[in-house]
Amino acid sequence: MAAVTETRAAWTHRLAERGIDRQLLLLGPALLFVVTLFIYPFFYGIGLSFQPEQGGPFEAYRSFFADAYERGTLTTTLWLSLPVALLNVGASVPIAYRMRGRFRGKRLLTTVLVVPITLGTVLTAQGLLNFLGPTGWFNRTLMALHVIDEPVRLTHNYWGVFFSLVITGFPFAFLLVLSYLSGIDPTLEKAAATLGAGWAQRFRRITLPLLAPGLATTFCLTFVLAFSVFPSAVLVGDPAGETRVISIAAWHAGYEQYDYPKASAIAVVMGLVELVVIAAVLGWRSLLYTGSTGGKG
Amino acid sequence: MTKFQQLRLEGVTRRFGGQDALVDLDLTIERGEFIALLGPSGCGKSTALNCLAGLLPLTAGRIWQDDTRLDTLLPEKRGFGMVFQNYALFPHLTVWKNIAFGLQMRRLPGAEIRRRTDEAIALVHLEEQARKLPGQLSGGQQQRVAIARAVVLEPSLVLMDEPLSNLDAKLRLEMRTEIRRLHQALGLTTVYVTHDQEEALSMADRLVVLRGGRVQQVGTPEQLHTQPANRHVADFMGFRNLLPMKVVTVGVSTVVEGGGLTLQGSPVGDVHPGDEVVAGVRPESLRIAEDGFPATVEVVEYQGREVAVEVVTDAGRRLHVRTADRPAPGDKVRLAVDPAALLIFPAGGAD
Amino acid sequence: MTKFQQLRLEGVTRRFGGQDALVDLDLTIERGEFIALLGPSGCGKSTALNCLAGLLPLTAGRIWQDDTRLDTLLPEKRGFGMVFQNYALFPHLTVWKNIAFGLQMRRLPGAEIRRRTDEAIALVHLEEQARKLPGQLSGGQQQRVAIARAVVLEPSLVLMDEPLSNLDAKLRLEMRTEIRRLHQALGLTTVYVTHDQEEALSMADRLVVLRGGRVQQVGTPEQLHTQPANRHVADFMGFRNLLPMKVVTVGVSTVVEGGGLTLQGSPVGDVHPGDEVVAGVRPESLRIAEDGFPATVEVVEYQGREVAVEVVTDAGRRLHVRTADRPAPGDKVRLAVDPAALLIFPAGGAD
Amino acid sequence: MKRPGALVVWGVVAFFFINLAGLVLSVVVSSFGTQWFDTWLPSGFTGQWYGEAWRDFGLLPVLITTLEVSALVVGISVLVGVPASYVLARRSFPGRRVLYLLFLLPILMPPITYGIPLATVLYKYGFAGHLTGVVLANLVPSVPFVILTMTPFIEQIDPAIERAARMCGAGTRQVFVRILAPLLVPGMLAASILVLVRTVGMFELTFLTAGPDSTTLVVALYNSMSAAGIRAQQAVDAMAVIYTGTMLVLLVLALRLVNPTQLVARVKEEDPA
Amino acid sequence: GCGAPTKSTPAPASSGDLPLKPASAVTLNILDVAGNLQLTQGMIDDFVAAHADTISKVTYSKATAPELAPKVKAQQNAGRVDIDLVLTGVDGLAAGVDQGLWQPLLPAYASRLPGMKDYLPGAAAMQKLAGDFGVTVTYYPSGPLIEYLPGKVANPPKSAQELLDFAKANPNTVQYARPANSGPGRTFLMGLPYLLGDKDPKDPINGWEKTWAYLTELNKYVEFYPSSTSETMKSLANGSAKIIATTTGWDINPRVLGQVPKEAKIGSLNGFHWVTDAHYAVVPKGVSADKQSAILLLLQEMLTPKQQAKAYDKGYFYPGPAVKDVPLSMAPADSQKAITDFGRTEYDALISGNPLEVPLDAKALVAAFDKWDREVGGAKVKK
Ligand SMILES: Nc1ncnc2c1ncn2[C@@H]1O[C@H](COP(=O)(O)OP(=O)(O)OP(=O)(O)O)[C@@H](O)[C@H]1O
Ligand SMILES: Nc1ncnc2c1ncn2[C@@H]1O[C@H](COP(=O)(O)OP(=O)(O)OP(=O)(O)O)[C@@H](O)[C@H]1O
Ligand SMILES: [Mg+2]
Ligand SMILES: [Mg+2]
């Protein structure tokens, strides 16, 4: 009896040394979800992409990459999503940084900054079309002020989609960055200040590195969001031309040509590209410090 | 970074949501001085340092550096160095980089940064830990990083908040000496917070004793040690036995009595016969002597060379005695006190 | 929570990425004992406590509580209490709630939680801060919360990691007494880390001296104070003067010489004529005496009742002396040492 | 404490907001307008579009479904996601990276790859076609989303605090409920809001698994927007305003309950002077 | 097996004779992917009100055509079909036929749908296109037409060439929406081969040389292609476009709704052929016999002139009825009023005076879209 508990103890001990213990069970529910509800459908989709109607297993991929018009959607999408993600994260950081500490009206300002998150694609699209359209208030105002003579076209092109992604993506990034930022011990900045670091240096050398893991995650999420843009690319973009993003190609293949293998293949390509970008970002992140961001006590 | 001649605090006050943490602190610090702030836990020492460093805005008062007003200046512009009570090490930088940080901020040439950083690391004996992150250090090692990080800059004013609290006795002695040495060699001005009287007495040129945010006494170590201004300072300076008594006679030697004891002592401040007073005496000033009053030993604590003894007088007064003799609990002893070692304070105290 | 009879550490070892922090610690702790862990900064004291608490997995070794193996048990199942070196207070809970937390975890009735929490708060004098958050406390106040939080549980074993380091002398003395009192009154077993020898000597039943992760000596305060096992322990126990010398004769009294001095002392361990040894003597054991060897006073540090003096012998040896006399720098003095107070250690040391 | 940077930052923010306000307002005005051609304002105002939208889509049940779905998805994904992200953030164990990747995939892969088979599975076991299916399908990207956003939050918390809680006798569950959860509130709030937004806006998965009585607002909205048929612009605007209004109510409620920027752990900041 | 739509998966086809009437009243879930309910919901509701013993309740849902097939497919794969009746245009119908999703109703139950014999010629042609699967419920001749504000365009173009000349003379003022997203857009696209006399108007890849050349030339003067018809309407209304492509329904209905000024006028290009359009009712495989029989009864009722008259609506599918002899006077009062106020007298002549053509089949249409996207819409970006 004692021997049994002894060996069991030794066994759990050995596992614990490798980092395996009962706490890992906390992963259970999440794993259950992903495995039962995602893995099978996902592999089904991948499998489908290798079963085109004609040609070899890679025909769907080949036809995507062989066709400049299809292939081009990749660059189009990256050209849209990378700047948007950078801008969203990049703009959130200084704003959130200004909003550390307490001041009157902070809650209101936060709410106002986060509100665009509620707009949703459709209202944003409608608003952009109404507001930035040739006879919208924006152009009207500029013309009334004689800044321009002709309405500038800001919709049904790259910029329309760009704005819509900024409007929906910025609050998203801001909310995350602000919350991540609030987890950093303000004493550290004070310490840096006594060492002669001005605000820019404090930000660059102390806050930014401590924020990096959060920034990486935020960037990844905003990027993924922008990369899979679909409705706004159609609604306020130029879905046949400038903003023919990759999801339009996938949609076209899947829901207009009913070529599911090809749609799956395009989606897989999409996922892979995202994965490459994210791997790059997370790889960079893992080089940096990760850990608690408070001092002692 | 310019050396100043004088730093003047005028009525410096800091309140936290209605609660006073520091009230009306007036203090002039001369260049090159070593000032120690002393006082019970929560008396406002760290608050005072933070105000000086510019990390806490003042609720009232001003700070002058010679003729420039300092309290409106950003902390990074003041050029002071600070050792934080909780270290505040940068968790993402190695020990080496933590220490080099300030030098890098000054844009010194790389070679000089390396040299000075390495020197500072050697000073605090952390050569082996130089590449570790703060999270991988022991408490004392972290504290030493904090010290090195502040002194490596050779700032015109160094603020140290209990910088040695987590070091062992030997290292603490050594660090004390180093800090004093740096202070003198570099001509620094130092404001030093400590809870350790001995440290304060041995290092500082002047001591400032705070209590409840208010200054109680400012003076040289000797003044504080021998002539505490009131019973609170006395209490804090090691007069562990503080006995409420009544004045009998005032004269060449003042006689007080109470709790079955009649003692002679030296008054601090005005006392008159009949006044309620507090008589203070250090444990080490109580001698076991044949001609003394009787008491019974209750507790004996081993403290190396001496023992700390708790005795109870026949009238039930509890007294602390420190002696090289080794009485045993239950022993009857007789205790005497030198009139010069017994200080008599007005009971009200100067709060 | 069951009271145990004995806690046995067998070869407890902890490595951090190849670096030893604690090596092969064997120790038996009896119920009701008060054990102090002492040692220089970074010697593995906190590591040892963390291993005992179950917060760090062991690299090797076992811990037994009577007949049950403890090291595989989760920390929360061990029923120990701990004061962390860096406090680790719950930042989102008020002082009161921090302290009540453990009691709430035990699902005690509300009234009892209130009573015991209030008692613990009173014990550490934080009545006025009870509703504050840890971020609003001074360093010493935070430390007191940490103490109260651990002892309020009256755990079978309390682990304290430098619990008094941020308190002022007066409060420290008081807390010491309280901790001892609780220890005795509640029949706790305590493992106490401190860097303060005096604290260790006065509080503990047994001391464990660590160095570089290895046990140097285990013994009663008296044993450690008077018979340090090697020069490292001596160094740590206040033998500030450690002089490399050579043995001349061994006998009733051992004579050593070196650096122009010839001294008599008591050997610790085997020494033979001609051996390289280290002679250790405390500053307070050096007397100013007519029959002593000559030296020149270099530095005098005021320390209250006594002064710390640094002298240099004619041959250039630097010695630390503690005395109630007040020599001035430059004075010529003669120093003597009692043979019983001079310990002679083999030079190699027992590392 | 004014710095030039601050002015630029706030200037840009203000410009952004003026335009944003114009944008939103233009939709709101339009949704109340009768006819709006080449003028500053519509030629007349009416509430008829809201009435129409309400009737056409039977919005009341749709709103209720939307609320139910989003509350369930947010609740479940936080409950399931936070513990998992805790393990991923705090522990190192064999296979950790693989798991991380596994949790990343559902966010990366567009629903088009797995939507149909997922819906098939859910229909097969009788989950799809009603609320359960919609909730389950939406959890697929939401749970990983929570895991991903929460990981850095958890890393930020000093592990010593958890240890202290364990020493006080708190088991894993209690450490979560009593210590981590309150410290993670800003993170969980941020994650919840984002999951909420994504769920309310998730068209594909909801559509594929929704039954006739379990469509959500976004499905109705997309249909009003892009389904065949001629619909007045204003009616679409009205739908969009209803959608945004709903989200806004949810968001403001959430922000009222908790302030995401005030991490209770950090009360060292200066109080308002 | 479950999974994405594949062509082979057989779904249980409940063949054999259906009961004439469901054993007990059924509930029907109707999915509309064509905006057809706007025309037919009144008919259905009437039927349910009158025949509660056949259909006790109807739930409606709406979606876009491309989403139809995946949803039905997922349900069929899982063996639980909860969509009973689909109202769709040509595209959705074809997608389902392609995937084998629909239950063939014809010719087996033609006898139960007597109204089909009375189809208008155009509707009959559209019904032929549907084969055995769909039942035409509404029909209209559609376009292509052009629309303009008389105040802005004094001399509207009368032929394709004039339209091009107009675009040249007034760059950026001619608009049609991206065909894949817009009915008028695709009608314009499909109508061009007839206008220009292309080799094979049914073969966009090999038979539309002139059309593609024309569109490419026109493209030079077109600023952009909105992704919805509503956008072109808005442009027309606010003056940023002068001429847009439209259809009969898109002419009348937006003016009724106030999207386009009432005074807007339509024009036709010389020699155009109508490219007709229709909505179909289809039943997915896997729907129970009882429900199918109820649906047949419902369709039977919907094809009666009395019900068909409701298809006049507010001009959305003008005229709308698929069967003969349904004068406007039979339509509900508000419908009559809308058509009287906003309808156009010239339509009768245009409808009778121009040939009717069925639209491209789904495959050819997708190919045309694809080619248009690549060569016309996508030509704006320099790659
Ligand atoms: N996570 C870690 N990674 C690497 N090394 C570590 C880590 N934690 C502790 N160490 C090292 O282990 C040694 C022992 O550390 P420990 O904290 O036990 O020291 P200590 O005796 O408590 O010292 P102090 O009195 O300074 O607190 C130190 O040298 C320290 O640098
Ligand atoms: N942010 C704050 N909010 C409210 N009260 C505060 C805050 N910071 C400090 N205090 C209070 O101000 C008083 C002075 O604090 P301070 O940190 O200066 O004490 P201290 O002298 O450094 O004490 P210790 O020796 O314990 O570190 C304390 O009573 C403390 O509780
Ligand atoms: Mg302090
Ligand atoms: Mg330690």
Image (cartoon, coloured by chain):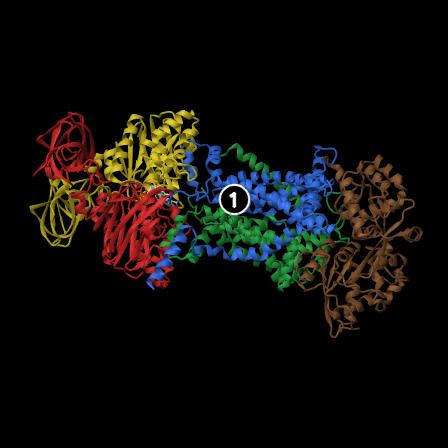
Chain colours: A blue, B yellow, C red, D green, E brown
In this view, the residue in front, C139 or E363, is E363
Residue reaching furthest to the front: A56
Q: Nearer the viewer, residue A48 or A128?
A: A48
Picture quadrant of residue B106: top left
Q: Is residue D259 visible?
A: no
Q: Residue at x 35, y 53 (%)?
A: C54
Q: Write down which quadrant ligand 3 falls in.
A: top left
Q: Quadrant of the N terminus of chain E?
A: bottom right
> Type of residue at label 1?
Leu
Residue E217 occupies quadrant: top right
- Does B281 appear above or below B191? below
The residue tagged 1 is A178
Place residue C249 in its image quadrant. top left
Task: Name the spot of residue A72 as percent of width and height, x first.
Answer: 69, 39
Q: How many marks?
A: 1
Residue A269 visible = yes
Q: Position of residue C236 (x, y in %)?
A: 23, 40
